[in-house]
Amino acid sequence: MQYHESMIELVGNTPLVKLNNVTSTSGATVLAKVEYFNPGGSVKDRIAVRMIEAAERSGELRPGGVIVEPTSGNTGVGLAIVAQQKGYRCIFVCPDKVSTDKINVLRAYGAEVVVCPTAVAPEHPDSYYNVSDRLVRETPNAWKPDQYSNVNNPRSHYETTGPELWEQTEGRITHFVAGIGTGGTISGTGRYLKEVSDGRVRVVGADPEGSVYSGGSGRPYLVEGVGEDFWPSAYDREVTDEIIAVSDKDSFQMTRRLAKEEGLLVGGSCGMAVVAALRVAERLTPEDVVVVILPDSGRGYLSKVFNDDWISQHGFSEQPISEPTAGDVL
Ligand code: PMP
């Protein structure tokens, strides 16, 4: 019989798909690693498995333990799936800019969710970092994975995403592009690819305009899951050769094009990363191979990125909305 022991076994080994229509014909080949094929629908399943299994080995997570984590959703889904399969309870803390769709998904997997205001400083008692710290202190048998500082976050990409890309491209990858949130994906994958290629692979970070990685102060932007207002230790600054800042508007327009023109219904951070990848690709030749990570699916953003009213309300429309003229049917 051909079957998997549980959904946990299906994490990783995601496909690489060529982008054909949003790319220009003269630049490099651009391949997308489509992480929504993971069972929880995002790249974060990879770190969930590794962080939990490492904590079991170290004794930090014991039978009957409670996993408490500040997460914008995707890490929560991964943790919730692995936790329910292994018999742990989960409590997640989310900023209020996260879509209700994402929060409902966490609850569907059996997790408890606490929602905190986005518009407060990280040191504020109600910030989602502080609320989660308080929950850890007050909950018996609690363990906080802390994806922002957990070495198993970048390590999971060093051990899985990096080797997968090297094998899938038969060593022909020349550039690796990823959005930076905790920095785990770019640091672990980038470090592996640099080591295995003797430093040949260039690593490019994509960042929302205003976030610290591209020199900002953390000004709010609307793309979810990427950019920060502080420097997490999971991010290894040595690995990135270049950071490209991308506006919300460019990110969301590209996200919509990926669905319409490439059959890829993905999240806003994917559009952001593809904009950066195309900027890299246009300086190169077709022999170069640019790989871009697409972290999650667009299903969690149907009421935002894929909602025409939301897009025009925020001024992200492709065309300026024209005033109705006499004769228009309203
Ligand atoms: N995109 C989305 C939608 C995410 O949830 C995350 C994780 N925060 C990222 C990109 C960035 O990944 P990383 O944390 O590994 O830098």
Image (tube, rainbow, N blue to C red):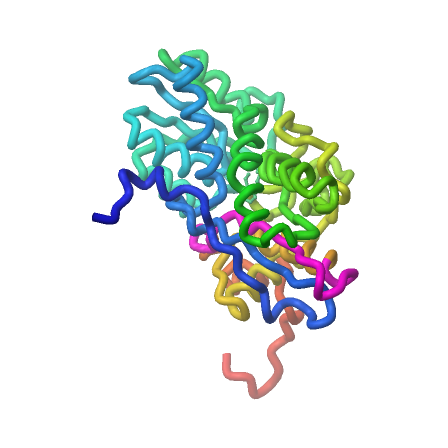
In this view, the residue in front, 98 or 74, is: 74
Give the residue at x 28% y 25%.
Answer: 87
Give the residue at x 41% y 37%.
Answer: 78
Give the residue at x 35% y 15%.
Answer: 62
The residue stretch that appears in magenta: 281-300
Q: Is residue 227 something one can see in this rendering?
A: no
Q: Image quadrant of ligand 1?
A: top right
Does 125 sit above or below residue 311? above
Left or right placement of residue 115 versus residue 10 in this view: right
Does 188 sit above or below residue 100? above
User: x%, y% of residue 113?
Assistant: 39, 32
The quadrant in which residue 280 appears is: bottom right
Does 55 sit above or below residue 14? above
Residue 63 sits inside the magenta stretch: no
Left or right placement of residue 55 versus residue 292 in this view: left
In this view, the residue in front, 311 or 22, is: 22
Q: Is residue 244 something one can see in this rendering?
A: yes
In this view, the residue in front, 272 or 29, is: 29
Does 111 sit above or below residue 201? above
Left or right placement of residue 115 versus residue 231 in this view: left
Residue 296 sits inside the magenta stretch: yes
Give the residue at x 74% y 41%.
Answer: 199
User: x%, y% of residue 156?
Assistant: 52, 33
In this view, the residue in front, 259 or 134, is: 259
